[in-house]
Amino acid sequence: MSTYEQPYVIPNVNIKREDDILFIDFKNKQKEATRLYVGRRPKTQSINYLLEENESGKFEVELPLALAPYYFIVETSSFQTNIFGERVLPLEEAINVRDMGGYKTKDGKYTKWGVLYRGDQLSKLTDKDIDLLERIELKTIVDYRSSHERSINPNKKIDTVEKTVHCDPSSSFSEAAANAADLNEENIKLVKQLENGEVNPKYINGKGENVIEDYRHTVTSETAKEAFKKFMKTCSCVENAPLIHHCRGGKDRTGLGSMFLLLLLGVEQEEIIKDYTLTGIIRKERNELKYHLYKELTQNEDYLAYLMAMIETRREFIQASIDRIYELYDTAEAYFIQHFGMTEEEIKAMREFYLEEGAN
């Protein structure tokens, strides 16, 4: 049996899937009669089929994976949730593809579900995975990977996709992968860099200072500017949605792209940080495996601490890039207008399209 518990959905709602069974837990503090509605599209008027009613707020419903995704609303006599769904898409061969919907903005709106996705590479998708992505009518892929990364792990063909945009920000985090044929070769190269003195000794610890410096540098880097400008401009053409942006693991390049986009949409900082740190929860088992693989190559504790800091998603990493923006500009809008060449009209149109009112 395949079991997956969502790391985060929306406040007061948890979801766990066991094959075709979904367990939805709504924190029903008032112990009122609670109704669970489902729909196939992420629009309030489409989520109108009553699945179950009880007072516990705990629901066990059969919803076949072969027909996912599903969207839900929970309602009581005094309360209604916003739209929600399975944030991490239930794919077999991509672990970090997720919906960017449901995040609250500073003016009380929410990002829409079903239009913006972020992820890891789409090179190993199964036929079932492709079917799901076609059911969400995925139209555009923004791929941050280098040409070498794409050549050794090309994305699978998805028939609904009309456009793929390549925009490599040349992040230092992708350098090891750029000349490695596989994960083992990459790990060996990373350890060799440490042993050969290619890494500044001040970074060889678990503080992650090199990550923080790289994230801050990305805010002003000309190469990164051109790449992320291309991404932002692609998002500004709203006919490109539904859209996914991704790199290899969905952590650094995609994490920074997500931060830029959510910040432009006016999403609260804590929500932006939450979106970033979810990758660490999702990749927990993978990171533990990486640690053991590193340990087969070196017993140096400082090396191991450095290597693990490189693959973690700490809140201070993404916070450093946000702080850098506000060190240089009075407002986020000023940054996007002056740095990326966005217009006020584009920003307004993007907020109108990608945001919606909440239920409360």
Image (tube, helix red, strand yellow):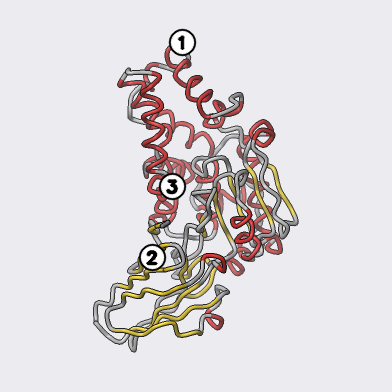
Q: Residue 202 lies in what quarter of the image?
A: top left
**Residue at the right extreme, as displayed:** 162
| Label 3 crowd bin: few (<14), some (14–19), many (20+), radius 10 Å | many
User: Is the residue marked by circle 2 packed among few (<14), some (14-19), or many (20+) residues within 10 Å?
Assistant: many
Relative placement, left or right, of 264 versus 282 is right
Q: Choose mark 3 or mark 2, whichever is in front.
A: 2
On residue 274, the disc is none
Quadrant of residue 150 in the image?
top right
Q: Quadrant of the N terminus?
A: bottom left
Q: Which mark is residue 279?
A: 3
Residue 15's label in the rendered image is 2
139 sits to left or right of 220: right
On the picture, is 63 further left or further right than 167?
left
Q: Which residue is the extreme one toward the bottom?
A: 77
Q: Is residue 317 above or below residue 198?
A: below
Question: Marks 2 and 3: in contact by CB < 8 Å?
Answer: no
Q: Position of residue 227 (x, y in %)?
A: 65, 41
Please, what is the three-letter code of the amino acid marked with disc 1? Asn
What amino acid type should be assigned to the residue bearing mark 2? Ile
- Residue 204 lies, in percent from the top left, at 37, 21
Q: CA distance from mark 2 to mark 1?
A: 47 Å
Helix, strand or loop for disc 1: loop
**Residue type at the position of mark 3:** Thr
Is residue 305 shown left or right of residue 151? Answer: left
Q: Residue at x 42, y 39 (%)?
A: 286
Residue pointed to by mark 1: 196
Q: Quadrant of the C terminus?
A: bottom left
Q: Residue at x 48, y 78 (%)?
A: 38
